[in-house]
Amino acid sequence: MHEDYISIEFRGNLDNLKKLLCGTPCPQPQPDGFDFKVSPPQSKGKCMHLDLLIDTTQKINLTVTNPGDAAPIWTVESGDSTILVQPDGLSADLISSDFPGETIYSVRGTRAGAPINDSITLTVMAAPPGQDFGLVAGLPVPKNATAFAKKV
């Protein structure tokens, strides 16, 4: 299991921080308080885990944006969904099974000789009713578009 950390920017005294964390309003910040800054979570250099959700009519493409020493190895560890890895090994389509459930994938490789092990959980849900036809809309055109056609 991995953990995400987030930092928070806050200017005020400790009582105001407690109120903020508990969801109660706090007065204007005081100059004698703490300073925190919010930043996006960053990897601790351990296994990254990605959770994805699609339905039984979909697939999703993943791309390695920070490749290692060689193309990674993509593997289905468990579950019924499949994978189609591109020839360069840097992207793959995760293809949903025909039935709802979870599939666990692993992506393994090395960078500077050190192992990299990422994992993906693909959760497949049932397709919403009415989407079994795979309808695709075209571009809108003016209602009178046929008026411009020449009669032969």
Image (spheres, rainbow, N blue to C red):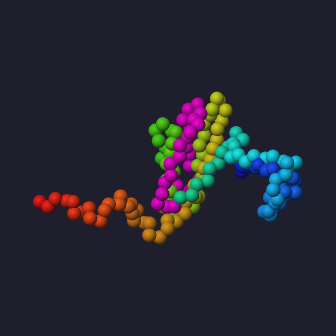
The magenta-colored residue range is: 55-81
Does residue 52 belong to the magenta stretch? no
- Give residue 90's position: percent from left, percent from top: 52, 39
**x then y, percent, for residue 68:** 59, 33
Residue plotted at (64% across, 38% down): 116
- Name the spot of residue 150 as percent of width and height, x first: 16, 59
* Residue lying at 80% horizontally and 58% vertically, measured from the top left: 20
Residue under the image location 81 percent in, 50 percent down: 11
Q: Is residue 103 visible?
A: no
Q: How many marks?
A: 0
Front position in the image: 67 or 148 = 148
In the shown orientation, is residue 33 left or right of residue 124? Answer: right
Q: Position of residue 85 (x, y in %)?
A: 49, 43
Give the image quarter of residue 147. bottom left
**71 or 6: which is nearer to us?**
6
Decide if residue 85 is on the left or right side of residue 109.
Answer: left
Look at the image and tell me whether residue 17 can be seen. yes
Image height check: is 27 above or below 87?
Answer: below
Could you tell me which quadrant the C terminus lies in? bottom left
- Front residue of 31 and 19: 31
- Based on the picture, tell me whether residue 73 belongs to the magenta stretch: yes
Front residue (pair 48, 73): 48
